[in-house]
Image (cartoon, grey):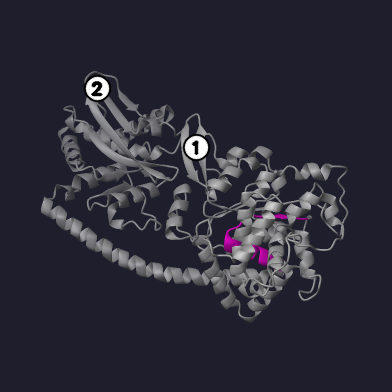
Amino acid sequence: MPSTIFSAVCIGMQVVPVTVEAALGQGFSGLQFIGLPQDYARDARERIRSSLESLGVSLPARRLVVSVRPSETLKLFKGGLEHLDLPCAIAILAALADSPSESKKNAGLLNAIALNLKEGTHLFAGQLTLSGRILVPEYILPFELLLLETGTAAAKVWSATVPSKISRAPKKHFIHVESLKDCLHALSQNNRLNRTDSDSAAAEAELSGVSQSATNATAASAGSNVDANSENQIHKIISFFEKFSSTPSVAAVLAVAAAGRHHILFAGSPGCGKTFALRHLSDLLPPLSHREQLEVALIRQRDPCPTDSRPFRHPHHSASAAALLGGSLLQPGEVSLAHHGLLFLDELAEFPRPALEALREPLDERKITLSRARGRIELPADFLLASATNPCSCGFFFSRTQSCRCAGNAPLKYQQKLSGPLLERFSLLLLMDELLDDDQRTAGSDSASPLAELAHGWQQAFNRAPEQWAHQFVKVQNELWSSTPVYPAGTLPETLLLLLETQAKSQKLSSRTLFHLKKLLVTLTSLFPEQISSWNCHKTLASVQQLRSLESALRKGASFLAPTEQHSFLKNSGKEPDSFA
């Protein structure tokens, strides 16, 4: 009779159970694998044959077929299936129990193994060497998650590794084996599968009790971990703002981006600090929750170690669209590797145009669907995008201190590398040079911008009580990160919303831009409630306009440098109300 063994593979974020069957047939055609890619089947045949011979088990001169399902899914892989060596070898050994050519010693061993595998509650994973040693599988997390979903007392994972801490799977369900010989010996001595129904029920009750105790212990441990993570986060936030104490406007902008999860783009002259500032943006991001850790680990399965820090990806500007989105092997690209983290694209205008345009859909959908000749796969891509760019080839087009060295319309051609639809995906579009100029002014002076006043206000509050301000920042951040993208009615004052929508219609702003403006207003009113409450609607909206100053600069071009009086983009909207508080 065919023997059935179980394993698993991971496709994107989906754990797929794998069934391995082996059967002896009449005639002579050797060992055959069906349902697997040809390259892997050819290599696995020799590894398994040599491993069995090292145990003194020889394959009979009969037709031996190993079938692996789901075949269509597995044929999408060109690599990463080596851990199926062990389940295939165990299935072959169980099938050989019916072979009369085996010695009495081997026959007794194989019969015991076949008997203990009838329940089908075992998962096997590991690549075999020619000497029969079992190598640690590259991907162990899918087996742990599948084990947790199964939830039976007799379920076991047989491998050369131990469970990772991130899955919180009970260690008693993992059997550590170093070689195929050790695995066979442990299987032959495993009598738990031969229990009566009452024994099985007792085992289930025992497992339930252990699981409950483990859950309670885990909950207590999780509580202490949450406190430790919170204190660590507060410390990182305080250190961050102390580092940017000399540039409060830059710190305020980064705080807005991190608190409201806004995509941000800095443009400015070389050496102004764009890259330095955005590299430290990850210090303000909240720690990963347990669910987010599992999702991140499923994508980065080669290193599924528990970590509270969010992923930080920084691809070079020569990266192609396939590198950013995912290649022909249906492997995750940078947008998926940055899931629940920060994707930093430095020198944004130097990236290939097709790669930049390909980012538009993941930024909206927060996922990426890869359709290739080998198949189709959906991967998550919920990341925070931070980018830096020069406004022209020399970098000084918007500088008030140095002249631009680009000839003719070269700056315009350079800026056109960033399309309008891509720029629309950013909530924060800022000129770094303007932010640094704001920090040179006195907050109480007539020339101070609304953003400079906000920065001065938070800096005073931070200097008075750093920990209190950091705790307030964390509270606001948790509220905004956990909320749905569509903010409920009543979050903003009706007067402010009415003026904003009126101006959006008059300036023919897109729905996406209007949505970004509303999100920015919610973040500002949450982070700086005291300052915003004392302002009128025009000044509040002027601060939002300043958070998208690059948009206006690109529209005006060289005329942006002309010294003109600052006006709100609501200057023609009618009578200004006194306050909306």
Q: Are marks 2 and 1 in contact (CB under 8 Å)?
A: no
**Magenta region includes residue 261:** yes
Query: As rendered, which of 312 and 192 lies closer to the eye?
Result: 312
Q: Residue 126 placed where, x, y %?
A: 36, 42
Q: Residue 23 placed where, x, y %?
A: 24, 28
Image check: 400 left or right of 521?
right
User: Taking the image as drawn, is residue 519 in sight?
Assistant: yes
Which residue position holds label 2?
62
Image check: 542 left or right of 13?
right
Image check: 483 left or right of 200?
right
Give the mark nearest the N terminus, 2 or 1: 2
Query: As rendered, which of 79 and 112 lies closer to the eye?
Result: 79
Q: Mark 2: which amino acid?
A: Arg
Disc number placed over residue 330 in the picture, else none:
1
Report the residue at 28% width, 26% height from top. 65
Q: Nearer the viewer, mark 2 or mark 1?
A: 1
